[in-house]
Image (cartoon, grey):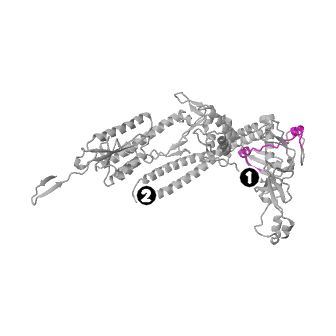
Amino acid sequence: MNLKTVSDSTEKRTVEIIPPVTQNASSASPTPAQGILRVAAYCRVSTDEESQQQSYDTQKRFYADYIHSRPGWCMAGIYADEAKSGTNTKYRPQFKQMMADAKKGKFDYIITKSISRLARNTIDALTAIRTLKSLTPPVGIFFERENLDSLDSKGELMLTILSALAQEESRSISENIRWAIQKNFEKGKAMVDPNRMMGYTKGPDPHGEWIINEPQAAIVRHIFKQFSQGISGNAIARELNNMGVTTVNGKKWYASAIFLILRNEKYVGDCEMQKYITESFLTHKSVKNTGHAKKFYVTNHHPAIIDRFLWDKVQFMLQKSSNAKNGSKTSTVPSLFKNLVCGNCGTNYFRTAYTSYAKNYTDERWTAADQYRETYTFSYNVWRCKGKYKKTKGKRRGRLSLEEKAGLDKNCPSKCLYECALKQSFMEMLYQLKQEYSVYGKSCKFYQKFEKAFQTVSHYEQTGSFTIERLKQLNLEISELENEYHKTLSHREHVLHLDDAPSKSQVSVYDALIRDLKQHLKQKKAEYTQLNEEILFSGHMKKTFSLFLHFLQELPTQNKAGMPLQIHGLNHIVSLTTNGNLTPSPETLQEAPDFLSFDKHLYHSFIKSGVVKGDLILYQTTFGIELESVGNHRTFSDFYGFRTCTDDGKVTLLTDAWQVNGKSVQYKKTLLHSSKDTAK
C-alpha cells in the first residue's frame, strides 16, 4: 500500500491509493496476488477459399501460443467461425457461444485481431462490447491491431468510430464485388455451377465450359416431353420414382422439383443472370429481382438439351395453367369449358353430372342371384346454361303474379351440351384447321383472318402515344416507391437494434408504412403490366399464333394402333349406327371415324372464351380471332360406330353410352326383401 501526504494551510490529510484488482489485456502481466487472468480468443474468416483457410488456421495457432506465453494468463478457449460473414452475427454459432459463455463467467477477457474480425456491423459490434462490459464482473475485449481495450473509458469513442469505419469498409467491399459481378454478367459470364444441375457437368476447360451429361439429359428430355403431352407434374414425379430415378442430389422426386426443371431456361441453352439480389450487405437477405435491379439474359450461352420450340410450348402451357405461377408446387388445369357463355341469354355454362344405367354391360362382379338386385351405372358430365333453370327464390308458383308466371315460362331455350360432344367437336375443328393450313398454307381462311387482326392491333399500338407516356410515368413512380421502400426497411432495421423503449415503439409505425408502400407498389406494377401487355399485344399475338400453328402440325395423324386417323367431317366415312353386340370386321374398323383424344392443355392455352349459338360455338382465341366449332349438340348415340383405341393398341367400336363416356362403370348390389319379411 502506498501513502502520499498532502500539505494544507489548515489541516493535514492523507490519500490512500488502492491499485486495481484486475488488469486489462493490454497492460502488464498480472501478479500472483491478483490471480490468473482467463483469456479467450475469437477469430473469423469470411470465405472457405484456400488462402482464407490458411489464415484461419494461422489465427488459431497464433492465439494459442500468444495466450500460453503470457505470464499470469490462462487459456479459456478459442472461438472460431469459419467461412462466416462479419456483417451479421446471426449465422455465427461460435460468436453466439462465446457471448453465452461470457455471461456464465467462463473468462475475463477476449482477445481478437481487429474490430472487423469481431463484426463489420457497427450496431452488432457496439452491442456486443456494451453487453460484455455490463456483466458482473465485466468482460473486456482487446483489439490487437487497433491496440484498444473495451474496458478503457477513453476507448469508447474510438471504438465507435472504428466500428463505423469497419462497416463502411464492408459496404465498399460489397459494392465492389457487386460491380465486378455485374461486369461479368454484361460480358455474358454466368456464375453458375453446372454440376449442381440435372443434365450438365463442368468440363476441364479453365473457362468453365458446359458439357451435356447424356444419361441425366435423357431424364430432362423425358420430363419436358411428358409435360408437353399433358402429363401433370405429380404424375411425372411418381413415374420417375417408380423407375428408381433420383434427382441430381440423390433425392426423391416431387412436383416442385419437376416444375423447377420445366422453368429453368438453362435447358434451352440460355442463361438469365441476377434473378435474385441482396437487399442489404448487413443482413445478406436475398430477394427475387422483380425489377429492383437489372437482369442479364444470354441467348445460346451453352449447349441446349431441349429444342426451343419444345421450351416455348412448355412455358406457354405453364403460363396458362391456373396454378403454375412462381412458387407453386403443382399445376392444375381449370375446369373444362367454364369459359362458355350462352348466346341467347348471356349467362355462363356450368357443369353437372348425371347418372345412367350401363346397358349390355357385365363383368365378374355379376352374380345372377335371385335375392339380389344388381345394376351397372355410370356418371357423365353435361354443361347447362344458368339461364335455362331460373329459381323462384322460395315462392310457390301458385302465388306468383301473371307477369312472374310468364317470366318462368321464358327460360332460356338452350340445350344441354354433352361434354364428350364438346371435346370431340373441338378436336375435329383443330383437324379441320390443320388440313386447311397444310393444303393452302398462308392463304387459308383462318390465317388471313389473323393477318387482318394483327394489322389492326399494330396500327393501334403505333398511334397509342398516351399509353406510352403513361408507361414512362409509371416506371418513374415505381422507381421512386422502391427507393422509399428500401430506405424505410433500412430505418426499421436500425431502430430494431436500439435498446430504448421509444425507439422500439417506432417499429409499428415503420411496419405500417412498409405495408402501405408495398400495396402502392403492387397497384402500380399491376397497371404497368396491363398497359405493357396492351402495347405489346401484337408481339404476343404473333408469338401465340406461331405456337398455335406448331401445335396444329404436331397433332397426331395415327391412333395408337398405327392406323391413319379418320376425322368425322373431313374424310369420306360410312357412318355406322349400332346398338348392342357388334363384332366389327377389319374393313369396318378401317372405315370408322375416330373418337379423338381431347387435348385439355391446348384448349386452355389458346381459348379465352366461347359463345354457344345452338350447335355452333364461336371460340375467342388468345391470338385475337374467332374459330367455329360445330357438332356440339351430339349425344352418346351420335357416336355409336366411332372407333376408339386403347393405350395398348386395341381398337374397338363404340356401341353403348358407357363406352362413349369412357369412365369406369359402377356396380351396385341390393338385397331384395321376401314377401314374408315385407308382411312382418
Residue at the outermost left position: 9
The residue stretch that appears in magenta: 583-610
Residue appearing at x 20%, y 53% in the figure: 18
Amino acid bearing label 2: Lys
Q: Which residue is mark 2?
A: 504
Q: Which residue is mark 1?
A: 338
Residue 372 lies, in percent from the top left, at 83, 59
Observer able to see residue 415:
no
Horizontal side, residue 410 vs residue 73: left or right:
right
Based on the picture, tell me whether residue 476 belongs to the magenta stretch. Answer: no
Residue 425 lies, in percent from the top left, at 81, 46
- Whole-Å distance between the Cαs marked 2 and 1? 52 Å
Front in this rendered view, residue 153 or 640: 640
Q: Residues within 10 Å of mark 1 (few under 14, many from 20)?
A: some
Q: Residues within 10 Å of mark 2 (few under 14, many from 20)?
A: some
- Contact between marks 2 and 1 (CB within 8 A): the answer is no
Based on the picture, tell me whether residue 593 belongs to the magenta stretch. Answer: yes
Residue 31 lies, in percent from the top left, at 22, 46
Residue at the outermost front position: 676
Q: How many marks?
A: 2
As helix, strand or loop, the secondary structure at mark 1 comes to loop
Please identify the quarter of the rendering in which residue 356 is found.
Answer: bottom right
As helix, strand or loop, the secondary structure at mark 2 comes to helix
Observer able to see residue 366:
yes
Horizontal side, residue 269 vs residue 504: left or right:
right
